[in-house]
Amino acid sequence: MLYPVSNTDRTVLDLDGTWKFKVEDEQHPVDVTQPLVTTTFMAVPASFNDQTVDPAIRQHDGFFWYERDFSIMHALQDQRLVLRFGSVTHEAWVFVNGIEITHHKGGFTPFEVVLNDHLIPGKNRLTVKVSNLLDHTTLPVGNYHETTDADGRVTRHVDENFDFFNYAGIHRPVKIYTTPRHFISDITIVPTVDFTTGTAAVTVTATGEGLDLTTTICDAAGQAVATVDPTTHMATIPHAHLWQPGNAYLYTAHVTGTRSGEVIDQYDEPFGIRTVEVKAGQFLINNQPFYFKGFGKHEDTYVNGKGLNQAYNVLDINLMKQMGANSFRTSHYPYSDEMMRLCDREGIVVIDETPAVGLMTRFDFNMDAVVQPDFNDGTWTKMKTEAAHRQVIHEIIDRDKNHACVVMWSIANEAANYSLGAHEYFAPLFQLARQLDPQKRPLTYVGEIQASPAADKSSDLVDVLALNRYYGWYLDTGDLPAAETHLRAELQAWQKLYPDKPIMFTEYGADTIAGVHSAYGEPFSEEYQTDYYRTYSKVFDEMPSFVGEQLWNFADFQTKFGIQRVQGNKKGIFTRAREPKQAVQYLSERWHNIPDFGYKTKK
Ligand code: BDP
């Protein structure tokens, strides 16, 4: 899927701003044929939840309406006009002038619809009905129930089966972009590199309706350096300038569509030349063993909630670079197009995760139960998420396939991989992702602590073992020596089980209240968080096939209410306002001393 751009053949109209907003009263349904009657407004893009001071709106589970008007200038009316939503969380029904023109389910991926046949002269009315409901068929997974009172009034309730607040709304930009009637519809780029000669072979496959397509590759200065062969779709670039972590270099595939020799459409797709491969216990980027240093994150900021916040995105990457970090995971859903494009430009390495979080029916730490070979908690019969999972794997790969920053796909976070049925559920999804990704990136899922070497039933599917572990927090609370022993034992067991699979941590952390200090290193203090990270670092450094550390979490973030959460999850090494806690200093020193490449060499 191409990102909307302006050039001499295309333009982009921006529909962001302040829209009319209304919470649906299901007893008095909205008449979509009439303008929305409301006195409430919401900024777009943003979550609606923290823009209101009315708790009933903030906490409402159900349906919401957004509306605004737009007009298309005469000069554009013969163009193909495409309405595109960067994301609407979690389900959207889109109406133009009271007529439904598209529907999309899945809160973290873009969707679009051609508008031309739905427009009337002059002012047009764009209405979006949004649902924030989640259940056992959706990703993320929610526990849904509803009650009906004596008057027939239905109250819906979603209990998040995951640890972040269920922010909702029109989260990412709304645009109308134009293309000519004959247009370039997609571009797929696959780079390969001969490391002995430094020559890159780049396959660029462009598709377009009714056009003859040609592609030129331009370097970062805009100079043409190669032409794509129309038969093989291949371009050869001698002395290719590689995209490297922390040292991005972007080429552009300049695609031109002509009819009878006349240029009709053009599109510039930026891309990096880099390779990714898992081999003999190493994660190779550009044929060099890479070490991940960084974070699990969230899209989560004050007021905007999960809505796009570009200033925070820029700041977060600057903070990462200042610390010597090189990577993050888009925990627990695909992030905005804008963030992915920024990471391409900044040389930040990304593990791109689907919104498959909450695929478990129980949450306890009964490690003895789960190691039974026939352990079955019913997750894989209870959850009906397969269709949503397949859909989002299609969508995330379609959207992000060309991004140099994306080096691995994470198919799920903390599923019940220890329960019978896990392998049967995941095997076809891994197969699908492997088949769809043109760059054949490595795949993983992120495993939670109960999915130990003895209990995990599907770890054979992953290319990299990505582990979330909380020894010293949820287990061995406050006891770092015990945490160290357990951590070491588990990592040794994984290495023994899979001597050739790289292992990395995708979560480890301790809730820490900024400003709480303790001479005894008590849990929740800044000292404990630092000591916790020191303990883990020591064990990581002993393990030869350990290829990376992504801690939990970059910053404090909002969650649902719960007795373990005081205004959210406090495992950030930055506060929600991005003020550093003490651990930042320790981790910065450590990460500046760990090179991006060659830190671990397999013995
Ligand atoms: C893991 C989850 C993550 C949570 C974290 C925690 O993957 O979403 O926020 O633990 O408990 O279970 O802080």
Image (cartoon, helix red, strand yellow):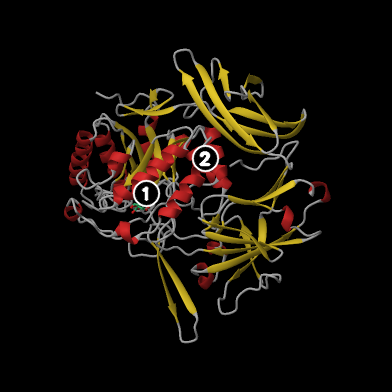
Q: Which residue is mark 2?
A: 400
Which quadrant is the N terminus positioned in? top right
Q: Which residue is mark 1?
A: 413
Q: Residue at x 40, y 30 (%)?
A: 592
Image position of 307 with respect to 250: above or below: below
User: Is residue 85 visible to us here?
Assistant: no
| Residue 495 x/y as whole percent | 22, 34
Q: Residue furthest right?
A: 74
Q: How packed is label 1: few (under 14 Cα within 10 Å), some, or many (20 or more)? A: many
Sequence-wise, the earlier of marks 1 and 2 is 2
Please tell me in which quadrant of the rendered image residue 432 appears: top left
Of residues 94 and 53, the one nearer the viewer is: 94
| Residue 459 x/y as whole percent | 28, 42
Please tell me in which quadrant of the rendered image residue 388 appears: bottom left
Q: Pointer 1 and pointer 2: residues touching (CB < 8 Å)?
A: no
Q: Is residue 593 left or right of residue 347?
A: left
Q: Residue at x 25, y 46 (%)?
A: 457
Q: How many marks?
A: 2
